Image (cartoon, rainbow, N blue to C red):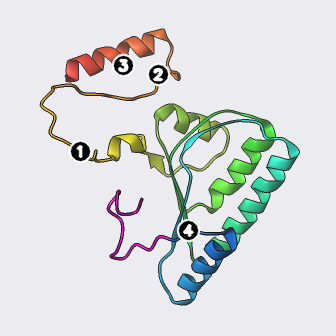
Amino acid sequence: FSKAISVDGGNIYLTQGSSLKFAYEIISAVIRKRRVIYFLLPGGINGEKDIGQLVKGYILFAFLAVMRAFGVDVCQVGVSYERLGRNYRQLLSFRSKILTYNAVRDAASLQYARECRITVSEVLPDLAFCLRPTVLERNTSKIVLLSFRVDKYDEAGRIALFRDLLDFI
């Protein structure tokens, strides 16, 4: 995987294994005075969590807080927030205060995050737009595939988005 996405070698170190091994690698790097950046998973965050999921969420929050105290940068990029339950919203608000960087992928998520008191650094486009495709064989077709979300727009917003896209093309 690391070779396929061209991140092997250099100043990037990838590891896999158990959670304990992962924590050990982070602690070792911090002791060696290396900069450690821990990225949380991107994606859509919504709904409410049951009590077990909330307990796990607060345990992760405590782990992230300890990492931040030791100088680890904790970041989240490419996330969207919508329709959060009260308890989950509170957890995410607490967690956002300890993140080094928290970028949402659209303006609607930024507005909703602010309403929920979730600290956001900025808006960045979805990570899918930032990936360079791997060319397996030469393709001479003139097909362009675009992927974007339209579920956050009403009908007028979707029409405006498509008109802007057609104007661009």
Q: Which residues are magenta?
A: 1-14
Question: Would residue 95 appear left or right of 38 to someone viewing this image?
Answer: right
Q: Point out the tag, 4 or 1, that comes first from the N-terminus.
A: 4
Chain-order first, disc 3 or disc 1:
1
* Secondary structure state at the residue bearing disc 2: loop
Residue, disc 3: 161
In the shown orientation, is residue 125 left or right of residue 81?
left
Q: Which residue is mark 4?
A: 16
Cα–Cα span, label 3 and label 4:
41 Å
Q: Amino acid at mark 3?
A: Leu
- Amino acid tagged 1: Leu
**Label 2: few (<14), some or many (≥20) within 10 Å?**
few
User: What's the distance in space between the residues labelled 4 and 1, CA to CA?
Assistant: 27 Å
Q: Where 143 sits versus 15, above or below?
A: above
Front-most of 112 and 31? 31
Q: Residues within 10 Å of mark 1 (few under 14, many from 20)?
A: few
Residue at point 23%, 44% (across, down): 136
- N-terminal of the pair, mark 4 or mark 2, is 4
Q: Which residue is mark 1?
A: 136
The amino acid beneath tag 4 is Gln
Residue extending farthest to the bottom is 32
The mark closer to the camera, 3 or 4, is 4
Q: Amino acid at mark 2?
A: Val
The answer to whether 74 is drawn above or below residue 22 in the figure is: above
Q: Nearer the viewer, residue 16 or 152?
A: 16
User: Mark 2 highlights which residue?
Assistant: 150
